[in-house]
Image (cartoon, rainbow, N blue to C red):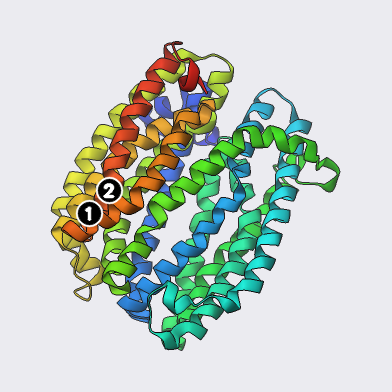
Amino acid sequence: MRLNKFRRYLPGTLQKFLFEGHDRSLKAKRNIIISFFIRGCSIFISLLLVPMTINYINPTRYGIWLTLSSVIGWFSFFDIGFGNGLRNRFAEAKAKGEKELARTYVSTTYAILSIIIGIVLMLFIFINPFLNWAKILNTPSEMAGELGILALIVFVFFCIQFVLQLINTVLTADQKPALASFFSLLGSIFSLLVIFILTKTTKGSLLYLGMALSFTPVIVVVASSLWFYKRDYKEFSPSFKYVKFSYAKDLMNLGIKFFFIQIAAIILFQTSNIIIAQLFGPAEVTPYNIAFKYFGIITMMFSIIIVPFWSAFTEAYAKNDIIWIKNIMLKLFKSWGFIIIGAGVMLIFANIFYRLWIGTSVKIPLILSTFMAIYVIINSLNSIFSQFLNGVGKIKLQLYFSILNSFLNIPLAIFLAKKIGIVGIISSTSILGLIVAGVSFLQYKKIINKRDSGIWAK
């Protein structure tokens, strides 16, 4: 982020973009520029991983891996919102120069999440032998033993990463999401290298695949935590001395709302693979996720633009800088217009891209790509409002709709899937997302115009 020494080598327009304007905006813009490069590399690597993984195992086993990963991912809700609570509280404390308070929030969050995930891990180790993973994932019964071992391996690494990835929360709260993205990129690079080695040295194995894709991110978060807490963030490094469980309530007041939103989001977005596996078989999970990954490029690129503004909105709202918020939201809405155009262009070239990307081993219907494009357009619009509402901490209405949608989505998705096929699943999520977008827009207008009251102000 030290760009000043390179300023004279940059074109005039780029100099103006990176060095002129509000300090808060400059941080965001610099993060966006760097993140575009980092995320671009991440997208390229993730695209390489898909065909390499499918060729290493096969489309059906790849679908099994995706479904199992989704199930394990559900356990992320044991964060209970502490991560997002830390993000806001750390940003507020640092903005006010209260460094000791910020360190207390960091230390307390690490301690609480370590205790929670430690208990969850012990419970999982106890009950895992009694779980029939072959039945859960709708696979042949002879795979039960292999899947049980795989689930345990993946879950152990997941638990380690669960706590240590808080360094990314701290970096993002300090308006440095580009750094957090960089370490995710390193994890992807290592995963790609390990999978490549596996393709040359072993036959297709779900166990080897699971270990490769589980331990590499852990190595990265361990290294990044040691690096930053020994250097740039030494004054905020977690310490037993600064663990104060009395501050848990302060983190939870906001965090518990994020917790329920996370649960609702997991139910809303992570049940698709399970529904597909049960209704159409695990092999059909693969084309759905390939289309999801392809159009997910839009989501990833747009997140580069909006992610830096969560903590920026927190700081701006705390300082009552409403004019800055209005200007930024207007620019984000304009950026969303390019998302619509981008989704349309990607849809036109979807089949060509699929053939170049994964060959002819998996067929993705055009109608599935069309509905996926509609979904990412709606989801991108919602992400603008969620960054603002999360940043200002007024998320109660978002919470209610998230819970309501999580209950409605599964029966609606199953109903539509039986009527119109797999596209019914993504259609359900899109319909509910469109309703949320309308409500969120009304809340934003009320908050920004100081006319929010009751549920709109909580």
Residue 7 position in % (x across, y down): 48, 32
The residue under the point 76% across, 46% down is 238
Say what amino acid the circle numbered 1 marks.
Answer: Leu
Residue 313 — which label? none
Is 216 situated left or right of 379 in this image?
right
In terms of secondary structure, where does tag 2 sit? Answer: helix
The residue under the point 50% across, 69% down is 213
| Crowdedness near tag 2: few (<14), some (14–19) or many (≥20) residues, C-alpha within 10 Å | many
Residue behind mark 2? 428
Q: Is residue 87 above or below residue 136?
A: above
**Nearer to the camera, 9 or 290:** 290
The part of the image, by quadrant, that contains residue 273 is bottom left
Residue 315 position in % (x across, y down): 57, 24
| Crowdedness near tag 1: few (<14), some (14–19) or many (≥20) residues, C-alpha within 10 Å | some
Residue 209 position in % (x across, y down): 47, 76
Q: Is residue 52 above or below residue 178?
A: below
In terms of secondary structure, where does tag 1 sit? Answer: helix
Residue extending farthest right: 241
> Pointer 2 and pointer 1: residues touching (CB < 8 Å)?
yes
State how far apart marks 2 and 1 are (Cα).
7 Å
Is 91 situated left or right of 43 in this image?
right
Say what amino acid the circle numbered 2 marks.
Answer: Ser
Residue behind mark 1? 416
The part of the image, by quadrant, that contains residue 92 is top right
**Nearer to the camera, 377 or 247:** 247
Q: Earlier in the sequence, mark 2 or mark 1?
A: 1
The part of the image, by quadrant, that contains residue 357 is bottom left
The residue under the point 54% across, 28% down is 393
